[in-house]
């Protein structure tokens, strides 16, 4: 049975982690070292997976602090150019695959369409003027959705996601379509989000995602994974609104944290995001095949299990 090809970040870690592990073994109790190395590898791989979103968020924060009001280029327009430059850089450096770039494009289109509707409905606003926009929506906003798609596509690859009891594609597609439609129709009709949560629980209740960090293969319920990613998106949204990249109506008179109620919306958006990713990265069933490692640690045991 073939082993999983090693990712670029795994190849880098294979050179970095063994000396780190040897150092930790000299200064810490031996029983703590494997867990610390695994946790360090997890943090590095997560940071690598969310590189697009991290760079975009860093640009939003930096321009909120240092963008001069008299600059000839509007802040939002700079963020559009900045996001495009990140994307082109990823492709040129082969940090992103063409299939992942396709996912990002789809996310950009899907997200921009929803932004146009939501801003017209008054759900949130973009308070600064700029040129590169459609209606009330600056074009950089689509890249914020694309950042979610980029993360999911990259984390599935770098962590070698495998699944048990993954639902049939038609059910996940139906759920994603219903969620997307409800983001629009709930302004005019019943909000069926609780039914959508129930549907989500029904089709994914038995699904476990297995992911390789460094030495070991770990697992968690996929629904828990959706929640954790949604939580971090909610935290990023608080940073975005504090940086006045966009504002909710209740924040116009002064910033406050985004309501926890928004977690539900982000959870549903996560479902759409993941289903779109699976259109170009088909979920693979768990087979038990270990992952290849480019170099062994000091004890020679870096094969995944």
Image (spheres, rainbow, N blue to C red):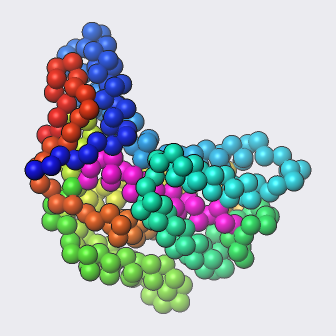
Residue drawn at (22%, 14%) of the image: 29
Residue drawn at (48%, 61%) of the image: 101
Residue 137 picture quarter? bottom right
Residue drawn at (49%, 70%) of the image: 106
The residue nearer to you, when weighing 299 against 124, is 299
Left/right placement of residue 258 relative to residue 13 reads right
Residue 143 picture quarter? bottom right
Q: Is residue 37 magenta?
A: no
Majority SS type along the magenta span: helix
What is the count of numbered marks? 0
Residue drawn at (59%, 65%) of the image: 142
Left/right placement of residue 169 relative to residue 126 reads left
Up-down relation of residue 199 to residue 99 (above or below):
below
Q: Which residues are magenta?
A: 138-161
Q: Position of residue 26 (x, y in %)?
A: 27, 9
Q: Is residue 139 magenta?
A: yes
Residue 202 picture quarter? bottom left
> Does residue 244 appear anywhere in the picture?
no
Q: Position of residue 290 (x, y in %)?
A: 15, 43
Q: Position of residue 302 (x, y in %)?
A: 19, 30
Up-down relation of residue 28 to residue 97 (above or below):
above
The residue nearer to you, when weighing 30 against 262, is 30
Quarter of the image with the C terminus in it:
top left
């Amino acid at each position: 049975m073939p082993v999983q090809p090693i990712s670029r970040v795994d190849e880098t870690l294979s050179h970095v982690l063994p000396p780190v592990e040897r150092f930790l073994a000299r200064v810490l109790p031996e029983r703590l070292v494997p867990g610390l190395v695994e946790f360090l590898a997890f943090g590095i791989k997560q940071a690598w997976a969310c590189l697009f979103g991290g760079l975009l968020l860093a640009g939003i924060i930096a321009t909120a602090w240092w963008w001069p009001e008299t600059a000839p280029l509007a802040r939002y327009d700079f963020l559009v150019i900045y996001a495009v430059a990140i994307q082109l850089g990823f492709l040129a450096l082969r940090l992103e695959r063409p299939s992942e770039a396709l996912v990002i494009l789809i996310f950009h289109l899907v997200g921009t369409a929803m932004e146009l509707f939501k801003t017209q409905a008054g759900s949130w606003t973009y308070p600064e003027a700029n040129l590169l926009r459609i209606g009330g929506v600056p074009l950089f906003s689509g890249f914020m959705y694309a950042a979610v798609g980029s993360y999911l596509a990259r984390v599935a690859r770098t962590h070698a996601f495998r699944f048990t009891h993954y639902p049939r594609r038609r059910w996940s597609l139906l759920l994603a379509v219903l969620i997307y439609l409800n983001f629009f129709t709930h302004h005019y009709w019943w909000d069926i989000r609780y039914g959508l949560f129930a549907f989500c629980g029904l089709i994914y209740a038995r699904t476990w995602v297995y992911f390789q960090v460094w030495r070991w293969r770990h697992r968690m319920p996929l629904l828990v994974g959706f929640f954790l990613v949604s939580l971090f998106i909610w935290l990023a949204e608080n940073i975005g609104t504090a940086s006045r990249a966009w504002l909710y109506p209740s924040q116009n008179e002064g910033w406050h944290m985004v309501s926890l109620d928004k977690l539900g919306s982000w959870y549903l958006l996560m479902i759409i995001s993941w289903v779109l990713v699976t259109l170009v990265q088909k979920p693979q069933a768990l087979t038990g095949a270990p992952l290849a490692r480019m170099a062994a640690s000091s004890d020679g045991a870096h094969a995944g299990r």
